Amino acid sequence: MQTFTYSALFKFIFRFGNILVTLLLIIYIIPIAWYLDENLFLLIPFIVSLSVLFIINRTYFTYYKILPYKIEADEEKMICSNFLLSNKVITIYYRDITQLKGGIFDGRLSGVLKVCDNNNVCIGFSQKMKNSSKLITLILSKVNKELYDKVIENLSQRKKKNPGK
């Protein structure tokens, strides 16, 4: 059984990165809100800042739900554990995987990769995980042929769009 985890830096960023950004945005938003009645031109940065704050926190809450910090993989399943603020353990069998989304699975160079099974259980992981390429290779080698072909098609479409890369 192989174990995949994050380095301490990325574990910290994925767990607590939004707290620092949220505090900085709130510090920025408070004076704008204070002077909003005196200058309506401040409405634009106020709305933009609130939107950014909402998007960042929504993204992090999604990560908190689907991002395990430890994945153990063998020849038939992945055991995902160490979720933030949860003791849950999720087991996904390769034969039950119905969707591979995000990141390299969709032909992009970065992003959170999502693995979903036929019970609508999804987990995500980042390519920042130690030896994530081994995990990606293992997943692709074990999923059904149709799903594998779909991922390969997405990758080949990316190469057609960017032939020099």
Image (spheres, rainbow, N blue to C red):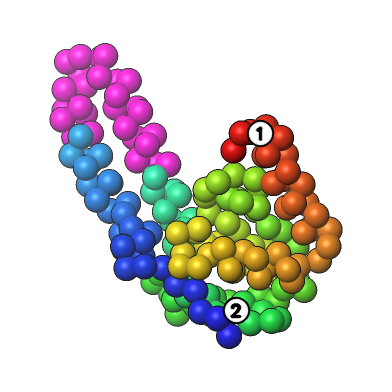
Q: Nearer the viewer, residue 63 or 38?
A: 63
**Residue, x 20% and y 34% (percent of image)?**
28
Q: Residue furthest front?
A: 164
In front: 122, or 129? 129
Give the SS element for disc 2: strand
Circle 1 sits in a helix, a strand or a loop, which is it?
Answer: loop
Q: Nearer the viewer, residue 93 or 62?
A: 93
Task: Indicate the position of residue 156 as horizontal and vertical percent values.
Answer: 73, 43
Q: Is residue 140 above or below residue 38?
A: below
**Residue 43 is at least partly visible in this image:** yes
Question: Would residue 64 appear left or right of 113 to someone viewing this image?
Answer: left
Q: Is residue 30 magenta?
A: yes
Question: Which residue is under mark 1?
Answer: 163
Residues under numbered marks 2 and 1 in contact, where contact means CB atoms less than 8 Å apart = no
What amino acid is at disc 1? Pro
Residue at the spot x=66%, y=47% of the render?
106
Residue 31 percent across, percent down from the top left = 15, 30
Q: Which residues are magenta?
A: 29-55
Is residue 142 toward the left or the right of residue 83 in the image? right
Inspect the magenta stretch and tell me whether residue 13 lies in it.
no
Q: Amino acid at mark 2?
A: Ala
